[in-house]
Amino acid sequence: GAGVSQSPRYKVAKRGQDVALRCDPISGHVSLFWYQQALGQGPEFLTYFQNEAQLDKSGLPSDRFFAERPEGSVSTLKIQRTQQEDSAVYLCASSPVTGHQPQHFGDGTRLSIL
Amino acid sequence: GESVGLHLPTLSVQEGDNSIINCAYSNSASDYFIWYKQESGKGPQFIIDIRSNMDKRQGQRVTVLLNKTVKHLSLQIAATQPGDSAVYFCAEKDPNYGGSQGNLIFGKGTKLSVKP
């Protein structure tokens, strides 16, 4: 399809394991964003890429969180040594770079840490 | 009222009625706003947006009103249908970013329930 694609849709990991979440943005979209959504809350910003450059990572909650977008297209959010409080839905969004354009979201990865 | 944790504000309407969902924002420098609809298990879906140089914008069955004086945003849905049942979020572009790019700051959401 033409939308933002995220995988896996669901991920269960044991506390202490590392996880990697993938995002395929809409083709041609230069900007890519990661958000974290806790149950019953609105999404909260994690990090922002423009092409391959990570322009803002101020929302990453700890140094266990790492994101990359090496070729300016697909992005991966990695969480090392997962903890129970990392359980959430991780959403990816993309948008064109020019003008005030809405961000388009994928359906997210639901991460559960046991 | 305000929601905390799982307690989202809820709006219950009869099918065919009009719905109005409200949102307050805090930063007078905010210049771009978006309404999203989120169904269970899905990501936020774009509904309509508005820039701060406008007071009103209309789409198909939806209207967004922006009152910059009181920093208030509303989404009106005409002839509400059961398929409109979802959580609705308003979002503002982070005003700390210059230019047209930047992350979004989301409100707490309102759950709309449509009774057939």
Image (spheres, coloured by chain):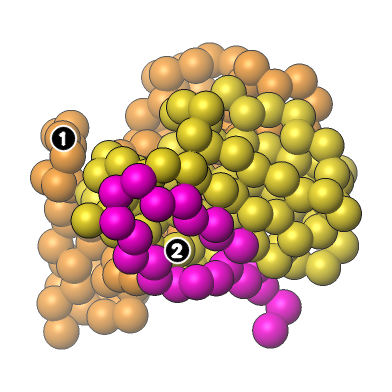
Chain colours: A yellow, B orange
Along the line of sight, the residue nearer the viewer: B12 or B54: B12
Residue at 64 percent across and 43 percent down: it is: A67
Which amino acid, mark 1? Answer: Val
Q: Is residue A99 magenta?
A: no
Residue A23 in the figure: left or right of residue B47? right
Q: Identify the residue at horizontal 12%, vertical 45% (top origin).
A: B7
Span colored in magenta: A1-22
Above or below B12: residue B70: above
The residue indicated by pointer 2 is: A109
Quarter of the rendering occupied by the N terminus of chain B:
top left
Q: Numbered disc 1: what chain?
A: B
Question: In which quarter of the view is residue B56 placed?
Answer: top right
Question: Could you say where residue A23 lies in the image, as x and y percent from the top left?
Answer: 64, 62
Tell me what residue is drawn at x 15 percent, y 84 percent.
B116
Does residue B37 sit above or below A43 in this rendering? below
Viewer-side label of 1, 2:
2
Q: Is residue B24 above or below residue A19?
A: above
Mark 2 element type: strand
Determine which residue is flagged by label 1. B4
The residue type indicated by label 2 comes to: Thr
Q: Residues within 10 Å of mark 2 (few under 14, many from 20)?
A: many
Compared across the picture, whether A1 is left or right of B67 comes to right
Q: CA distance from mark 1 to mark 2?
A: 23 Å
